[in-house]
Image (cartoon, rainbow, N blue to C red):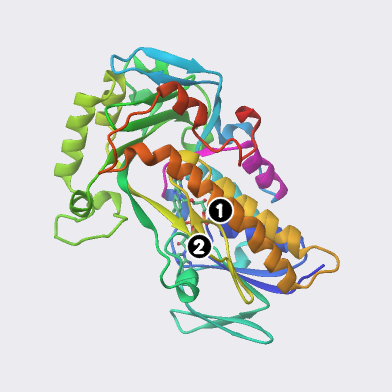
C-alpha cells in the first residue's frame, strides 16, 4: 500500500473526489484551485447516477435523496406537445452546485488552496514540483491533473491534444417550477422529455430547487437544446458585443442579446409549444460548444490526468461527474494494492481508465452524430434514442437496467 504527498490540481468535482479518497487512504493531500471565488454559484443541470451517489457517500459527503430529483420514465414529446412514446427509463436530474457543495464541505478547507493556478511541472527521480502563476512551488510524490477540459497539466505533456468541435452547440437553461407555463407541470414534472425538431434535440427534466428543496412548487426545470452550427456561426455566437472572440466558452452575461432573442424566437417556432415557452422564459441561458476530447495517455511519470482533463464525452452520455468519481476511485484503489509501487499502480490506472474514456467518448459521438453540421441530415427514431441515451453499458445504475 502506497502513501506519500499528493498534489491535486483543480478543486472541482474530480479533484475533490481524488483528494478525499487519497486522504482516506492515508495520503498527505493538498488541492490547488485556480478560481478564487465560490465555484458553487456556477453551472447548470446535470444527470447523476447511483454510482455517483455511492462514491459521494464513500467520500464522506452528506448524501440525501434531495440531491437529485428522480423521474421514472423518458418520453418523446411530439411537435404538437403530446407524448409519442414513453419508456420506463429513469433519470436522476440534479445541478452541478448541488453535487459540488457536499463534496466540498467534506474536504478540509485548510487543505484547499484557492486562487492557485498551476503553470508548470518539473519531475526528478524523487518526485514532482508544481510551479504556480504566483511563483510559489509545491513538492509531492504524485500530482493529479484534475484541471478540466483546458487542462494546463495535460498541455505540458500532450501539447497537440485539444477538444475537437463536434459541429453543434447547446443552449442550456434552468427555470424555477413556479415560473413554468401553466401546461408544464402535469406534462413534464414526472418524466424526462425528449423533443426532436428537424436535425436537433432537446432534453429536459426536473431538478432540485435552490437549497435542494424537493417539494412540489420549489423544484426547478432544466433543458439542454442541441443545434447544428457551422464554424462561422459558432465563432459569431461566442463573440461578445465588444468584438472579443471567446473561443468555445463564453460567460453567460456576455452572450449577445440579439443571439438570445433569435434563439428564443426559434424556440417558439420549432419546439413543442410547452418547451418553446419554457425556453422563452429563461432569463439567462448558457451556451456550450459541444466537443470531443480524448487523451492518448493519462500518466506521465508521477503525473496522472483525471476527469475532464483526460476525456470529455458529449453530454448525451450524461456521465461527466460519474466518470470523474470512477477515475478517482480507480486511482486510489490501484495505489492501495499491497505489493505494488506507485509507478506500477499508475500504469494500471492508465490501462483501465483509457479504455473507459475511449469507450464513453465513442458512445457519446454515436449518440450525437446525427446532430453534426454538414453531416447527412438524418433524423433518429425517437424510441431508439430514448432507449440508447446515456451510457447504460458503462455507468451502472439501477435505472438503466
Ligand atoms: C464551475 C463549474 C460548473 C460546471 N457546471 C456543469 C454543469 O452544469 N453541467 C455539467 O454537466 N458539467 C458541469 N461542469 C463540468 C463537470 O464538473 C465536469 O464535467 C465533471 O464533473 C468532471 O469534473 P473535473 O473536476 O474533471 O473538471 P472541471 O469540473 O472542469 O474542473 C476543473 C477545475 O480545475 C480548475 N483549473 C483549471 N485550470 C487550472 C489551473 N491551471 N490551475 C489550477 N486549477 C485549475 C478549474 O477552475 C476547475 O475548478 C462544471 C464545471 C465547473 C468547474
Q: The C terminus lies in which quarter of the figure? A: top right
The residue lying toward the viewer, choosing from 220 and 172, is 172
**Residue 278: quarter of image:** top left
Residue 168, given in percent of the width and then of the height, sits at: 30, 44
In this picture, residue 376 sits left or right of residue 24: left
**Residue 139: quarter of image:** bottom right
User: Above or below — where is 385 with respect to 349?
Assistant: above
Mark 2 crowdedness (10 Å alpha carbons): few <14, some 14-19, many ≥20: many
User: Above or below — where is 366 with respect to 312?
Assistant: above
How many tags in the picture? Answer: 2
User: Above or below — where is 123 with respect to 167?
Assistant: below
Magenta segment: does it hold 355?
no
Q: The N terminus lies in which quarter of the figure? A: bottom right
Tag 2–tag 1 contact (CB < 8 Å): yes
The residue sitting at 62% across, 32% down in the picture is 65
Helix, strand or loop at disc 1? helix
The residue sitting at 68% across, 67% down in the picture is 347
In the picture as drawn, the residue positioned furthest to the front comes out as 376
Residue 41, given in percent of the width and then of the height, sits at: 43, 49
The residue sitting at 53% across, 28% down in the picture is 214
The residue sitting at 45% across, 20% down in the picture is 75
Q: Which residue is mark 1?
A: 357
Q: Which mark is residue 295?
A: 2
Magenta segment: does it hold 47?
yes
Is residue 142 among what the camera can see?
A: yes
Q: Which residues are magenta?
A: 42-58
In this picture, residue 395 sits left or right of residue 93: right
The residue lying toward the viewer, choosing from 211 and 286, is 286
In the picture as drawn, the residue positioned furthest to the right comes out as 338
Amino acid at each position: 500500500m502506497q502513501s506519500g504527498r499528493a498534489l491535486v490540481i483543480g478543486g472541482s468535482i474530480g479533484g475533490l473526489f481524488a483528494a478525499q479518497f487519497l486522504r482516506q487512504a492515508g495520503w498527505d493531500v493538498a488541492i490547488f484551485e485556480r478560481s478564487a471565488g465560490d465555484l458553487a454559484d456556477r453551472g447548470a443541470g446535470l444527470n447523476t447516477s447511483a454510482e455517483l451517489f455511492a462514491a459521494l457517500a464513500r467520500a464522506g459527503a452528506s448524501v440525501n435523496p434531495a440531491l437529485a430529483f428522480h423521474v421514472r420514465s423518458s418520453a418523446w414529446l411530439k411537435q404538437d406537445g403530446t407524448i409519442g412514446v414513453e419508456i420506463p427509463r429513469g433519470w436522476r436530474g440534479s445541478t452541478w452546485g448541488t453535487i459540488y457543495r457536499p463534496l466540498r464541505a467534506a474536504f478540509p478547507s485548510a487543505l484547499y488552496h484557492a486562487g492557485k493556478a498551476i503553470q508548470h511541472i518539473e519531475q526528478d527521480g524523487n518526485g514532482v514540483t508544481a510551479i504556480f502563476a504566483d511563483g510559489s512551488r509545491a513538492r509531492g510524490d504524485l500530482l493529479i491533473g484534475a484541471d478540466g477540459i483546458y487542462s494546463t497539466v495535460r498541455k505540458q505533456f500532450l501539447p497537440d491534444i485539444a477538444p475537437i468541435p463536434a459541429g453543434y452547440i447547446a443552449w442550456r437553461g434552468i427555470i424555477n417550477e413556479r415560473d413554468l407555463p401553466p401546461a408544464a407541470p402535469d406534462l413534464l414534472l414526472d418524466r424526462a422529455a425528449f423533443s426532436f425538431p428537424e436535425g436537433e434535440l432537446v432534453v429536459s427534466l426536473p431538478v432540485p430547487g435552490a437549497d435542494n428543496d424537493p417539494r412540489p412548487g420549489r423544484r426547478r426545470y432544466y433543458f439542454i437544446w442541441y443545434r447544428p452550427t457551422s464554424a462561422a456561426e459558432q465563432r459569431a455566437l461566442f463573440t461578445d458585443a465588444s468584438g472579443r472572440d471567446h473561443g468555445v466558452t463564453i460567460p453567460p452575461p456576455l452572450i449577445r442579446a440579439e443571439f438570445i432573442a433569435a434563439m428564443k424566437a426559434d424556440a417558439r417556432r420549432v419546439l413543442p409549444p410547452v418547451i418553446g415557452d419554457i425556453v422563452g422564459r429563461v432569463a439567462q441561458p448558457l451556451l456550450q460548444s459541444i466537443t470531443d476530447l480524448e487523451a492518448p495517455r493519462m500518466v506521465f511519470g508521477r503525473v496522472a490526468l483525471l476527469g475532464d482533463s483526460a476525456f470529455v464525452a458529449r453530454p448525451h452520455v450524461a456521465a461527466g461527474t460519474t466518470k470523474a468519481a470512477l477515475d478517482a476511485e480507480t486511482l486510489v484503489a490501484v495505489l492501495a494494492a499491497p505489493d505494488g509501487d506507485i509507478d506500477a499502480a499508475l500504469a494500471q490506472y492508465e490501462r483501465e481508465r483509457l479504455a473507459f474514456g475511449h469507450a464513453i467518448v465513442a458512445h457519446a459521438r454515436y449518440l450525437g452524430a446525427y446532430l453534426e453540421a454538414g453531416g447527412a441530415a438524418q433524423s433518429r427514431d425517437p424510441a431508439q434514442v430514448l432507449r440508447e441515451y446515456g451510457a447504460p453499458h458503462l455507468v451502472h445504475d439501477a435505472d438503466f437496467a
